[in-house]
Amino acid sequence: MRGALLIMRRLRSIIIVAIACIILAYSLGAVYGEVIIPNGQAEQEDEHEPFAEPSTPHDDRPEPRSPDEVDDTSSARDLPCLEETAMVTTEGIQIVTNPDHVLVLVNKERNLPPDYIPNDLVAPEIPFPFEGDDPRKLMQREAAEALQQLVAGALEESLELYGLSGYRSYETQKQIFAYNVQRRGEEAANQFSARPGQSEHQTGLAMDVTSRQVDFGLTQAFGKTAEGRWLKEHAHEFGFIIRYPAGKEQITGYQYEPWHLRYVGVEHAHAIQASGLTLEEYLEKK
């Protein structure tokens, strides 16, 4: 009898711990807006689960052109030189030297300085699915004002967009990535979560957006909603690009994220939209 009771107590303890882990995992996702479930490994049978489905090319995507086909009469002539805007540390790590530039390129090869914090962070006057002062609401002022116009433009078409995750500090990203590595392993985590210093959110130029149609989550299904389709067609008019498009994973290093908006300015956004290039390809034109 005592043996049976002991087994039952242990089982109850295991169940409690498991439930606590699940709550913690989804709390991190809610707090930071970070996708913590990799492609094809959803934990729930929910069509809105982030990365529940593998990303596939969209038939309605504009046919990308090669970098050589982009019109050089645009502002491409003024692009920052990638080789001249990064320094290499003694450990062989590239650190960008132009973190305040609107076209700063941050990815798995180019890191922001750990102590970099934009000096003009403000909260755009747009709806968020949470209340109160929160660093997730912040963006650089120019980007925030442009995002206000974008959200207003969508609303004119009876489409409601919500901000979910903007600025994120180096330390916050460090905690998120470490947590995802602990849960998934480093290789898997790096497919959907940025290492500290490699997140565009630290620049203050990025905002993850969402809508009611996807329960205010970050999921590839957002790209199929009316809001997601509108963003794909009109974000560039307000100076934004879909930073991680479908079919470009080998270039950007990340899976398709229809919710991740990156501000680059209207002129550059138009050029990138017309070319079908990623930010990496566009800047390599220099």
Image (cartoon, grey):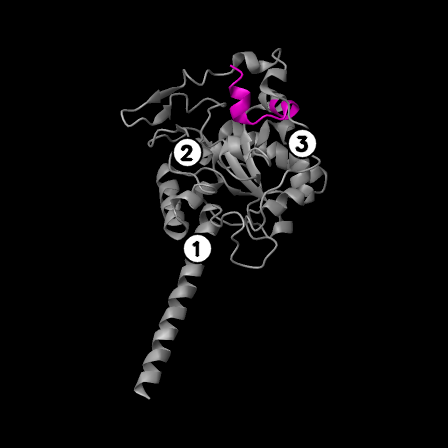
Label 3 element class: helix
Residue 153 picture quarter = top right
Q: How many residues crowd mark 3 within 10 Å: few (<14), some (14–19), many (20+)?
A: some
Residue found at x 44% / y 60%: 22
- Residue 231 location in percent, x, y? 65, 36
Q: How many residues crowd mark 1 within 10 Å: few (<14), some (14–19), many (20+)?
A: some
Residue found at x 56% / y 23%: 265
**Mark number for residue 25?**
1
Q: Earlier in the sequence, mark 3 or mark 2?
A: 2
Which amino acid is tagged 2? Gln
Residue 174 forms part of the magenta stretch: no
Q: Earlier in the sequence, mark 1 or mark 3?
A: 1
> Magenta region's main secondary structure?
helix
Q: Which residues are magenta?
A: 272-286
Would you say residue 70 is visible in this rendering? no
Compared with residue 50, is residue 195 higher up or lower down, i.e. above or below? above
Which amino acid is tagged 3? His
- Residue 192 location in percent, x, y? 48, 42
Would you say residue 68 is visible in this rendering? yes
- Residue 208 location in percent, x, y? 53, 40
Residue found at x 42% / y 17%: 83
Label 1 element class: helix
Left or right, 224 with respect to 255, comes to right
Residue receiving disc 2: 198
Residue receiving disc 3: 234
Q: Are marks 2 and 1 in contact (CB under 8 Å)?
A: no
Q: Nearer the viewer, mark 3 or mark 2?
A: 2
Residue 72 picture quarter = top right
Q: Earlier in the sequence, mark 2 or mark 1?
A: 1
